Amino acid sequence: MAQAKTETENENAEREPVTPSELDELTHAEMLELYRASSEATRFAKHQQWGTLLGTLILFVLLGVIGDHAYKGTFLFKLVVIISLVLSAGAIYSLIIYQFWQNAEREKLSFISSYLSNLARSVREQVTERERNVHRYVLLFFMLASIGLGNWLLIAYLAPKL
């Protein structure tokens, strides 16, 4: 027990002192509200991204069912293929727009955090910007690849009827 207490005291002694924000109380509250709003907007954009991916893949399955039951060479069959291509392009465009939106919100968060305490900045710096970017863009790549693969599988599934 005494040893654990000594280790905690040593950690506290090594930490830099907390420097509060230099903003007045109302401006600080306003910045916190802006920070919260940007965080919520980022979460919403992420939710929309995943919803777009899931919705697109579900629509591919539905288009596959419709295309399987449509007669070869009919307008409906050709329309299924055209819809799948347009759907893919629209979904990919949407995913990229959501990514730009998230990046804009993250820029706001960085700006706002520069006016908060040094402790708040230290917490945000626990993960480097480079690491965050790698995670974001790897996920975006797999989302885009999933849509491309889903469309390719749909076309390959319907290809014998083309």
Image: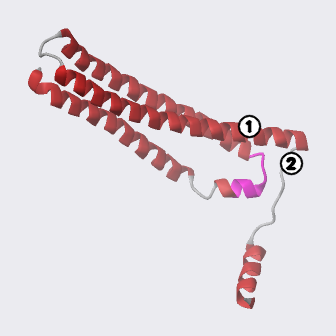
Task: Identify the mark at residue 22; answer none if there is no mark.
Answer: 2
- At mark 1, the secondary structure is helix
- Give the crowd class for mark 2: few <14, some 14-19, many >=20 residues within 10 Å: few
Please tell me which residue lies in front, 87 or 74: 74
Residue at x 69%, y 58% (from the top left corner) = 122
Instruction: Tell me if 63 is positioned left or right of 130 in this view.
Output: left
- Give the crowd class for mark 1: few <14, some 14-19, many >=20 residues within 10 Å: some
Measured as percent of width and height from the top left, residue 117 is found at 79, 53
Check disc 2 and give the amino acid type.
Answer: Glu
Residue at x 18%, y 21% (from the top left corner) = 69
Check disc 1 and give the amino acid type.
Answer: Leu
Instruction: Tell me if 146 is positioned left or right of 4 in this view.
Output: left
Measured as percent of width and height from the top left, residue 106 is found at 61, 40
Start-end of magenta stretch? 114-122
Residue furthest top as drawn = 75
Query: If the image is split into quadrants, where does the N terminus sit?
Result: bottom right
Q: Closer to the observer: label 1 or label 2? A: 1
Q: Is residue 149 visible?
A: yes
Measured as percent of width and height from the top left, residue 109 is found at 67, 42
- Report which residue position mark 1 lands on: 34
